[in-house]
Image (spheres, rainbow, N blue to C red):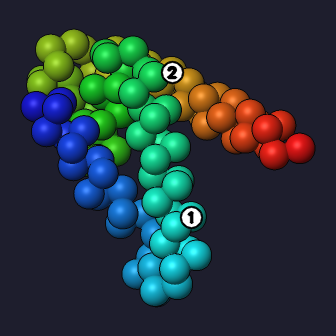
């Protein structure tokens, strides 16, 4: 299920950018780069956190549904999701800072 969902991440992450902005080639390129950054950061998360992020953010399951799919209590889903979001944020910021340092 997670492999299918990760494949769908590529497809649904295109929906992050409004259609009106997709008409400009430069905006399309930036959106593609941003999707690649998010996918790379997701792959660096531990599997148990990545699974919960994908189920919540891309499959749009409720905490209760994720709890049933993964087989852990709702509180565990919530704490893993919180930690995963914090790690994703840190990974994306680190990646962005690294790119900026390399550009200088």
- Cβ–Cβ below 8 Å for labels 1 and 2? no
Tag shown at residue 59:
none
Location of residue 92 in the rendering, given as x and y in whole percent from the top left corner: 61, 37
Whichever of labels 1 and 2 marks the residue nearer the N terminus, that label is 1
Question: What residue does disc 2 label?
Answer: 83
Residue 11 visible in this rendered orientation of the protein: yes
Q: Is residue 79 left or right of residue 9?
A: right
Location of residue 71 in the rendering, given as x and y in whole percent from the top left corner: 15, 14
Q: Is residue 63 left or right of residue 37?
A: left
Dot 1 falls on a residue whose secondary structure is helix
In the image, residue 23 above or below residue 90: below
- Quadrant, the N terminus: top left
Rendered image quadrant of residue 65: top left
Question: What residue does disc 1 label?
Answer: 30
Task: Give the farthest residue toward the front.
Answer: 103
Location of residue 86 in the rendering, given as x and y in whole percent from the top left corner: 58, 27
Question: Image point 79% across, 38% down: which residue?
Answer: 102
The crowd level at tag 2 (other Cα within 10 Å; few <14, some 14-19, many 20+) is few
Numbered label tally: 2
Question: Image point 12% across, 25% down: which residue?
Answer: 69
Q: Label 1 to label 2, Cα distance in Å?
A: 27 Å
Dot 2 falls on a residue whose secondary structure is helix
For this rendering, which residue is in front, 1 or 96? 96
For this rendering, which residue is in front, 84 or 77? 84
In the image, residue 16 above or below residue 80: below
Q: Nearer the viewer, mark 1 or mark 2?
A: 1
Residue 61 visible in this rendered orientation of the protein: no
Q: Is residue 102 left or right of residue 4?
A: right
Location of residue 63 in the rendering, given as x and y in whole percent from the top left corner: 27, 33
The crowd level at tag 1 (other Cα within 10 Å; few <14, some 14-19, many 20+) is few
Rendered image quadrant of residue 104: top right
Question: Image point 12% across, 24% down: which residue?
Answer: 68
């Amino acid at each position: 299920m997670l492999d299918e969902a990760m494949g769908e991440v590529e497809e649904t992450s295109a929906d992050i950018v409004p259609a009106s902005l997709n008409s400009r080639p430069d905006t399309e390129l930036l959106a593609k780069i941003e999707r690649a950054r998010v996918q790379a950061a997701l792959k660096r998360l531990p599997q148990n956190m990545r699974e919960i992020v994908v189920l919540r953010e891309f499959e749009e399951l409720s905490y209760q549904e994720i709890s049933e799919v993964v087989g852990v209590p709702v509180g565990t889903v919530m704490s893993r999701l919180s930690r995963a979001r914090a790690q994703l944020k840190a990974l994306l910021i680190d990646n962005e800072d690294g790119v900026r340092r390399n550009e200088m």
